[in-house]
Amino acid sequence: MAVVTPAAPAATEEDKELLISGSEAVAEALTLADLDVVTAYPIRPYDTVMQAIAKKISGGQLVAEYIVAEGEHSQFEIVKHASTVGARVFCGSSGVGWMYAMECLVVTPPLRVPMVCLVGNRALDDPGAFGVEHNDALVVRDVGWMLCWIDTSQEALDTTLIAYRVAEDRRVFLPLAISADGAFLTHSQALTMVPPKSKVDRFLPRYDRGDLLLHPDNPITVAPQANEDWVIEIRRQNNEAMARAVGVIEEAYADFRRVFGRGPENPWFEEYMSDDADIILVGMGTISLPIKVAIREMRAKGKKVGLVRLRWFRPFPTEKLVAALSRAKALGIIDRDYSFGSPFGSGVVANEIRAALYNSDRRPPLISFICGLGGREVTLEDVYKAADMCYAAAASGKSDPKTHWLGVRE
Amino acid sequence: MAETTTFTNATQILEPFRGVKRVTIEEYFTSGHRTCQGCESALVMKLMVKASGPRTIVLGSTGCMYVANTTYYTTPWVVPWMHTQLGSSGSAALGTAAGLKALMRKGKMKSEAINVIAFCGDGGGADMGLGAISATLTHKEYNSLILLYDNESYANTDIQLSGMTPYGANTTFSPPGKVKRLIHTRWKKNMAGLMAAGHPECRYVATVCASYAVEMMNKVRRALTIGGPTFIHSLDPCPKGWDYDPMLSHELGELAIETGIFPLYEVEDGQVKYYGKTKAIVEGRPRKPVREYLLKQGRFAHFIEEDLNYFQAKVDEMWEKWEIPAVVPFRRLDKTQAALSAK
């Protein structure tokens, strides 16, 4: 038999640098991942990713079934079923569009369908607003979706590749939603390194549905009525898959760094000047930009403030986050979401962190902030104010039970 | 990323069964379900996959044929089967077909014609899932069949009325009372006509009734052979929901057709073809009075003469006034009326 010599990698091994938005970066990753089926339905701001994929397909860079659905409910159902016959799928939505698909979102984790989605975070109606709030993606936090928040176009591209690697790992087989702040990331361009396909092929194996494949050669019955006989066991299996995802995510990031030569050592959160910080602020997504600028200004004046930007919300990095946060003298949690009637009236992230710290021996005073809702700009003044309140809490040694809304007309 | 050249969008060529003795003996829907005695929908499932054969994937939306058929640890399905949400039969068919097509096109799966059938009840299909079915019937590049099994109520959840429940029927959401005899006064949707008229590129729409089993199977085979998205509406007598002796299921199916309430036809590439006793009615055989059908069912036991007459008049209209009898409710402009309004 003749031996086929693999083509020399040569020039194709080079990354290329493109000026692209977060949505376009996701579309680059989907092309590299050789996506099979994608469903689109318009709603701002996530739909820019669907426009970018459509161009990839019409330009011949990607061969995939591109289906324009008649609503988000169908949008998510179509890819769910395409995934069960073995196709790599992509979907997404924003705000109330994501809510319209809610029924289909909750059935996906127990079906163990590893779909990857982009949520272009958007305020929920009413009143109408295109701007960012994290409540849309957060509604699925309890039902088995993996959730992460990204900050830059580069992170959008890299995380999309990592998302397929994690979701399609047989130890996990859970859906994954990547959240990108509407407008601030979906529509904002930045220089982004786009890797060659050869590198991606070394990192991302083909999706193999194995014995769960719906095919005449594997005539299985999927999702019958289980009732009280089996439901609780199935829920526990979901929970175990989510727990296994922790190790799979760490593996994936380590491999990503090995293959692509970039990417964070700590997958779970970005730490910005938090090592020696007295005050650590915590947030998700593009809110990191004003916070980082404010931190540099405050550091120049001798205030040791740092940031922990949470990337992964599900699975929640409890131990690692507690270890990183319990060093501080006080914590300020900045939610770009709300949870009306919750403990202390706080946002979702603040109460998750309170819960995570409960068993810790060192629980720094914590203040909960809500700001930037509906895409409202988060100003440096907002961040200074939050940091000052944290300093006051550090001095008194007491948590403030009140939740503070920043940048709101009184 | 290359597209392979071996993929074709071909369908299985399923020749019609020439008579009941030529029907294949293999069953792909067998024991393992717990449907009611006399359930015609279970028979429809059995005939549907008998007609399609083993290289078939079936998707079932929520309803009797999900809840009563598939209880974890048992299954009557010999072919691969998957549940889909109540309003999702259209999306399930489309997604499954698109997934197969993508993988075959790209050489990631062996290229072969696999039948994709999604079924829905009248609630899942004609109420909640109408939009998704409508969308799927416009996607002509994906081969799938959507079969609506119509037992004329949400029978699995306790017999609540749907958009397909006949006028005046007693359901748990429309109980006749001392003050109001009739709660449900909407006329039933004309699903097959709606699907045929509204989707010009859907090449095959048919109505069936399991009382005429060979004809029903052959319509399923025709739909799958023609390909693209296709639609079949099956009327399924339901002993529990309609309140009659289970031994009468077959007879009630026949009566629904003989009274002209439910016509048997197909629309292939826009051409209407009537079948069996419906064809005889079109050719002049008198219809049986609707009361012969209605009064055999407990759900119409509260009907008085006035109700029977109203029902009869509405059915007469289907046959005497509709431009294509019992298929689409369009009428030509009355010439004398037109002349009057012109003045």
Image: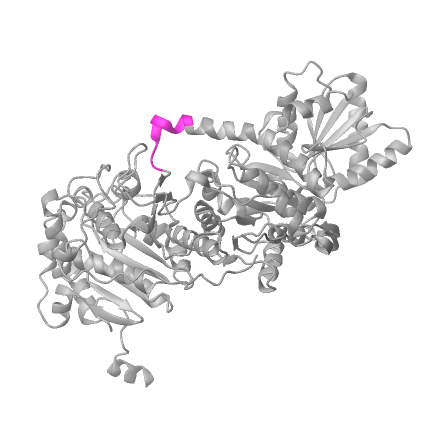
* Residue in view at x 19 percent, y 39 percent: B36
The quarter of the image holding the C terminus of chain B is bottom left
Q: Which residues are magenta?
A: A224-233
Q: Picture coordinates of residue A21 (x, y %)?
A: 70, 53
Q: Is residue B129 visible?
A: yes
Q: Does residue B48 sit above or below A281 in this rendering? A: below
In the picture as drawn, the residue positioned furthest to the front comes out as: A1
Quadrant in the rendering for residue B227: bottom left
Image quadrant containing the N terminus of chain B:
bottom right
The residue lying furthest to the top in this view is: A361
Residue A103 placement, left or right of A366: left
Question: As drawn, is B211 to the left or to the right of B229?
Answer: left
In the image, is residue B207 part of the stretch drawn in magenta? no
Tell me if residue B306 can be seen. no
The picture quadrant where one finds residue A386 is top right
Residue A300 sits in quarter = top right
Q: Is residue B179 above or below residue B198?
A: above
| Secondary structure predominantly adopted by residues drawn in magenta | helix
Residue B295: percent from left, percent from top: 10, 51
In the displayed structure, A353 sits above or below A296; it is above
A220 or B258, which is in the foreground? A220
| Nearer to the camera, A223 or B4 | B4
Which x, y percent locates residue A38? Answer: 52, 53
Residue farthest along the right direction in this orientation: A301
Give percent across and percent down for residue B264: 19, 62
A323 lies above or below A45: above
The number of numbered badges drawn on the structure is 0
Tell me if B109 is positioned left or right of A410 in this view: left
